[in-house]
Amino acid sequence: MTAEMLERILDKCIKEARILVVRLYYYDEPFLIRDMPKMVALCHKYNLPVTISSNLNVFDKYGPAILQEALETLMISVSGFTQPVYERSHKGGDIERVKANMAKVAQLRSPKTHVQVSWHHYRYNEHEMPLMRDYARKLGFAFVSYATSLLPLERAMRVWETGMDDPLGEDLLIPVGAAREACYARRHWECDGQNRVLTVNGDGLITNCNNRINRGNLRGSLFDTTVPALLKARKTDADCIGCKAIGGHIYAMQAYTRPEWSPMRLAGVFCRRLGIEGYVESLASGIYGRALLPLAERWTPKKAGR
């Protein structure tokens, strides 16, 4: 995406909706995008907070300029502290380069930028989590562990439909098939992706679901519709109806281990009804990311020999 396209998107959306945050990433690497410093500055011109997520294998070319714009949140995704463990999930990545770039971020970031190290928690990497947590905290970064899901969503739903395991899901704390019943029981919950997330690609094309990446997920140009019309159309979209009927949205949001009426869920409902949603997401992600871990132990397959 170019800065010019982003400006067109923001000009339109800010007139048609209340924007809580701009996430300048979507199955891509923001630190490879030439216009990213301009795009962060552009969001700030509209008084909009910015979140970026990166695996931080690259940094030097555009990273310093991006940090100079004092984005609000930088999330760094990692899955190991040593190379043999890290490369199992982050194929082609170099954890020593990542750690060196983390140190550069610590030196260059603005006090206004919150940095969070997001640990992708698998069965095989738990023993290295304390090492990365200590390193992150030494640099002044927050550390949050997430139990992972199989994404994009169409891969998980294929497992549910066929009963055949996906090889990419073998290391998950909670097997894809085991999560199906819990998702179905919560299928009546709202879908945040349907109601509150608008994903637009570099050509200005809208994606219907922010957890799918196939071409059938595209719904035309943002500039040929309005945000309210788009959100309304999702209520009767065949893909959305089919997904919600089996709780696919619950899997995508990693909400399948949450109790029906937890304090955090009540707070979220309360905030939405008051029109102040967006203030509990960071707290909820931290709590529920960790909450998945003990529950996952119930579903660890004994036959896997782990």
Image: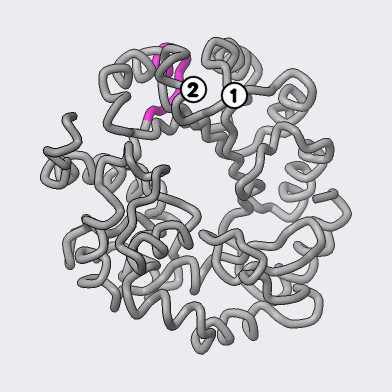
Residue at the spot x=30%, y=58% of the render? 255
Residue at the spot x=74%, y=18% of the render? 60
Q: Which mark is residue 87?
A: 2
Residue annotated with mark 1: 92
x, y percent for residue 185: 20, 72
Residue 9 visible in rendering: yes
Image position of 301 (left or right of 103): left
User: From which residue to which does the magenta span run?
Assistant: 136-143
Residue 271 visible in rendering: no
Q: Is residue 214 above or below residue 30?
A: below
Q: Along the polypeptide, which appears first: circle 1 or circle 2?
A: 2
Q: Secondary structure at mark 2?
A: helix
Q: Secondary structure at mark 1?
A: loop
Q: How is the image coloured?
A: one colour
State if disc 2 and disc 1 touch (CB < 8 Å).
yes
Residue at the spot x=32%, y=71% of the render? 247
Q: Quadrant of residue 187?
A: bottom left
Q: Which mark is residue 42?
A: none
Q: Nearer the viewer, residue 140 or 23?
A: 23
Whether the magenta-drawn stretch holds residue 132 is answered as no
Q: Quadrant of the C terminus?
A: top left
Q: Residue furthest bottom?
A: 236
Q: Quadrant of residue 29?
A: top right
Q: Amino acid at mark 1?
A: Gly
